[in-house]
Image (cartoon, rainbow, N blue to C red):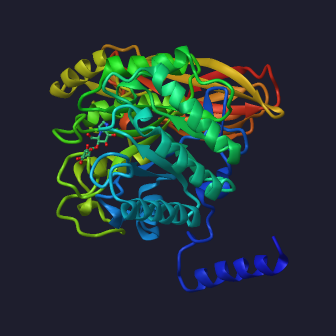
Amino acid sequence: MKNGKRWVIFLFVILSVLWGGSFSAAASTPLESHGALSVKGGKVVDSHGKTFQLKGVSTHGLSWFPEYVSKEAFQSLRDQWGANTVRLAMYTAEYNGYCTGSAANRTTLKNLVDKGVKAATDLGMYVIIDWHILRDNNPNTYKKQSLAFFREMAAKYKNYDNVIYEICNEPNGGTTWSQVRSYAQSVIGEIRKTDKDAIIIVGTPTWSQDVDQAAKSPITGYGNIAYSFHFYAGTHKESYRTKLENALKKGLPVVVTEFGISDASGSGGINKTEGDRWISLLNRYQTGYVCWSLSNKNESSALLKSSCKKRSGWGSSDLSDSGKWLVNTLKGKLASGTQSGSTVSQSSQTTGQTAAASTKVKSVKASKKYCSISLKREKTWKSGKKYYSLYRLVITNKSSKYNISDWKIQIRFKNSIKKSSSWNGKMKFSGKTVTITPVSWNKTIVRKGKAKDIGFIVSSYSKSNKISSAVFK
Ligand code: IDC
């Protein structure tokens, strides 16, 4: 940075303070902090080699709701909602779709994509350009158009560190993985002629659910490829989580480029409890997620109330129930209710209800007497000169008499560690120790219950860094 520019920034910060303005303009953006993303060891990682979770919001179809493609709207998503990513959903075959509408419509859509990419780039957000196949079932239906579109996008955005290409939203209608794979090989080849390193996300069969098939025969010959998995928590539950988790365990890089807590139609009742369970799984694997959709359409997946006419700067009263849940989730407040939080196991939920119904149950603070700590290192990998390790923590309330009202755990390592990421707990990393306290929804651990899905990733220069103690404080 030139000295002159540094002075301008310095003066700006001073003036903002004097004027009582906010610091936010000077705070660093997601892109400034994390740089170009890539795929390594089955994960999306940032430019420092750390696992990075894309978190954000998808537009509804660009032809339906062009009014939310703006810098003001995206800035609200970033600063008020806590999103680092926007997905631009460009339908190919429905409602003025890119491949079924007029030439003028194609130009309109491309202009919207450009406007969206520019807004996201100005704000330092990641942006996914989504070739939103749906009614057209098979991505090969409009493969020629797709090749031409992504050729153009790659030429335009090859030097952008924040642009991600999603080449087929949801193959369906019996389209097989081998058909999707063959389409993907061609489109990826076309993009790679120009854009050598951007992440490319490939949809999977059955509305982007069959990640198991992609895991069996992933795409070869190209780097920085990820696969998409979609879910709607009102419809897709445990069996789908198992399917996703199996693929993640196999090391398949996955991004949830679309999900909702409504049912699969985009409407119907929402299910926050299942939504929480999904997010908990995604956090555990540090898998990115993008929520459908930024619109005020009268359907329960829409994040804004249908009565809301604002196009940015939304307050809580402008948000639908899905919207409120999402904003809490993006801010790390998972719970849909005290006992329905995803970290409370099925059995403890039942116990929890009994406990709540009974006035006799006393609460105590966690200690060795009533609780046990299980802390496991799941894996260690090397990136640059450092070793990264992922740990998972489970706290069990052994008592059948008392609920645990609060807890605090201190973990000491042999050598010093640095925080890479953490989830489902408030964590302080300092020197060789990590101190963990609960988030709001896993503070109480009911009789015989567990607080699960708490985890963190630390880096260390020592390969054999071990834990020397883990105790309640
Ligand atoms: C839905 C929209 C709805 C629109 C319809 C068009 O919510 O307003 O009329 O598309 O077909 C998906 C798709 C996504 C769907 C969404 C909800 O990717 O396009 O949006 N959904 O049905 N996959 C699973 C659910």
Quadrant of residue 343 in the image?
A: top left
Of residues 90 and 354, the one drawn nearer to the viewer in this rendering: 90
Which residue is drawn at the image coordinates 24% and 41% (left, top)? Answer: 266
431 left or right, relative to 437: right
Q: Quadrant of ligand 1?
A: top left
The answer to whether residue 206 is above or below residue 144 is above
Of residues 242 and 148, the one drawn nearer to the viewer in this rendering: 148
Give the percent coordinates (x, y) of residue 53: 54, 40
Which residue is drawn at the image coordinates 34% and 51% (left, top)? Answer: 97
222 left or right, relative to 111: right
Q: Is residue 372 visible?
A: no
Q: How many marks?
A: 0
332 left or right, relative to 48: left
The answer to whether residue 24 is above or below residue 251 is below
Quadrant of residue 239 in the image?
A: top left
Of residues 50 and 212, the one drawn nearer to the viewer in this rendering: 212
Give the percent coordinates (x, y) of residue 346: 29, 18
Give the percent coordinates (x, y) of residue 354: 19, 21
Position of the N terminus by quadrant: bottom right
Position of the C terminus by quadrant: top right
The answer to whether residue 361 is above or below residue 13 is above
Which residue is drawn at the image coordinates 59% and 17% (left, top)? Answer: 376
Which residue is drawn at the image coordinates 23% and 62% (left, top)? Answer: 317
Quadrant of residue 124 in the image?
A: bottom right
263 left or right, relative to 326: left
Q: Is residue 352 visible?
A: yes
